[in-house]
Amino acid sequence: MPPYAYFNKQFVPLAEAKIGVMTNFLHYGTAVFEGIRGNWNSQKKQIYLFRLREHYQRLHNGCQVLNIDLPYTIDELCQLTVELVAKCRFEEDTYVRPLAYKSSESLGVRLHDLDCDFLAFAFPWGPYLDADRARCRVSSWRFPGEVPRAKLTGLYVTNAVAKTEAVENGFDEAIMLTPDGYVAEGSGENIFLAVDGKLVTPAGYDGILLGITRDTVIKLAQDELGIETVERHVGRVELYTAEECFLTGTAAHITPVAEIDRRKIGDGEIGAVTKKLQKLYSEIIRGNNPKYLDWCTPVYKR
Ligand SMILES: Cc1ncc(COP(=O)(O)O)c(C=O)c1O
C-alpha cells in the first residue's frame, strides 16, 4: 500500500500531493502544523493515535493566530485522520503531519485576502532522536521572543539552525534559551529536570510550546508516581546540577538526557524517575493501559 495524503479535499497517493511554487505559505511561513503519533500495538494488531483531539485543538488555536479559516471542525479533522491512517494500512509506528496553510498562489507578505486549506499525510516513522540517551548543547541561538505558543512553520527556522549547530558540534539536540536567558525547550521537545523529589519544567510564560507530551508527563508524574511538577523559570546552571533530565515530544517520546554542554547529568545513566515515566508512557501510547484508553484512538476496525 502506498502512503496516502488528504489533499485538495480528497485522499490521494502521497506522491501525487503536490503544491504550486507560488503558494503563499512556502514563502512566508504562513502555515500551522501538527505532529501526531500512531503507535503500533503488535498484539492487538492496531494503531492508536495518541491524544488526537488535543493535537487538533492546538492546530485550531494556531489557525486563530494566523487567521486561517479551517474548513473543518475538530471532530471532522479527527475522523479524517483516522480514515487517512487506516487507508495506509501500516503495521508499524506512524507519524501524521497535518498542515493548515495559506493556499493562494499569490505572493506578498500578509495574512489577509488569501485562501486557506488543510492537508495531512501519514508515513512510517520510528524513533526521532537517534540516541537512547541524548547529549545536548545549549544553543547560541535564542528562542524567538514574541512567540505565540503554536506550531507556526515560520517559527521553526530558529529551531532548525539551533539543531544543526548542535549536530555539527557532535551533539544530538539543542536546548534553546529564552531572550532573557532562561531555559526554553529543545528544537522539537520540551524539557524536564528532576530536582529534590520534584519535576521542574519551563512555564508557559517562558513562551514555550505547550507540548501534549509535556501535559501527559505532568499528569502521569502526579497521578501515578505522586510527583509534583513545578512550572517556573529554569536557569541554565540548573541544567548542569539536576539529578535527572529528559526531553518530551510526540516524535521523541520521553528521551533521557545524559549530558549537557559536556557535563554529565546525574551519573549519566537513565534516572529512576525518567525510567518509570518512560515505561508508563510507552504502555499507555500503545493502548496497553485500560485507565488511559480515552487518550488512544484506534484506527483499524477489528
Ligand atoms: C519546539 C517544540 N517544543 C515542544 C514540542 C513537544 O510538543 P508535543 O509533546 O505536543 O509533541 C514540539 C513538538 O511538537 C516542538 O516542536
Image (cartoon, rainbow, N blue to C red):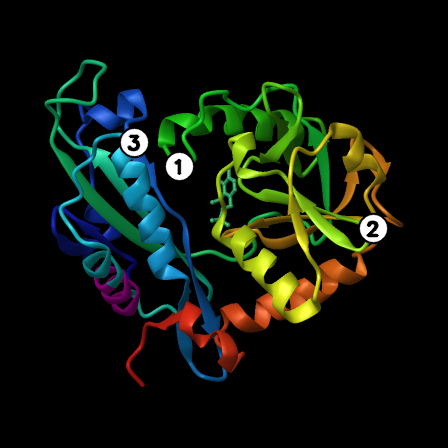
How many labels sit on residues?
3
Q: How far apart are marks 1 and 3 (CA)?
A: 8 Å
- Check whether the beta carbons of the residues at disc 1 and disc 3 lie within 8 A of each other: yes
Residue at image position (49%, 74%) is: 292
Give, as a single range, the part of the protein colored magenta. 79-87
Nearer-the-camera pick, 7 or 100:
100
Circle 3 residue: 65
CB of mark 3 within 8 Å of CB of mark 2? Answer: no
Q: Residues within 10 Å of mark 1 (few under 14, many from 20)?
A: many
> Which numbered disc flags the more N-terminal residue, 1 or 2?
1
Q: Which of marks 3 and 2 is in front?
A: 2
Q: Estimate the spatial distance between the alpha carbons at disc 3 and disc 2, rounded to whole Å.
A: 38 Å
Of the two numbered discs 1 and 2 in the rendering, the one whose residue sits closer to the viewer: 2
Residue corresponding to mark 2 = 196
Relative side of 67 to 286, left or right? left
Q: Say what amino acid the circle numbered 2 marks.
A: Asp
Say whether residue 80 is magenta.
yes
Q: Is residue 103 left or right of residue 287?
A: left
First in sequence: mark 3 vs mark 2: 3
Left or right of 262, for residue 211: left
Which of the labelled discs sits on residue 291, or is there none? none
Task: Report x, y in % for residue 47.
Answer: 40, 72
* Quadrant hosting residue 124: bottom left
- Residue at numbered disc 1: 150
Residue sitting nearer the eye, 234 or 1: 234
Quadrant placement of the N terminus = bottom left
Q: Which amino acid does label 3 sit on?
A: Val
249 lies above or below 22: below
Residue 28: image quadrant is: top left
Q: Nearer the viewer, residue 205 or 248?
A: 205
SS type, badge 3:
helix
Q: Is the residue indicated by label 2 positioned so its CB lies within 8 Å of ligand 1?
A: no
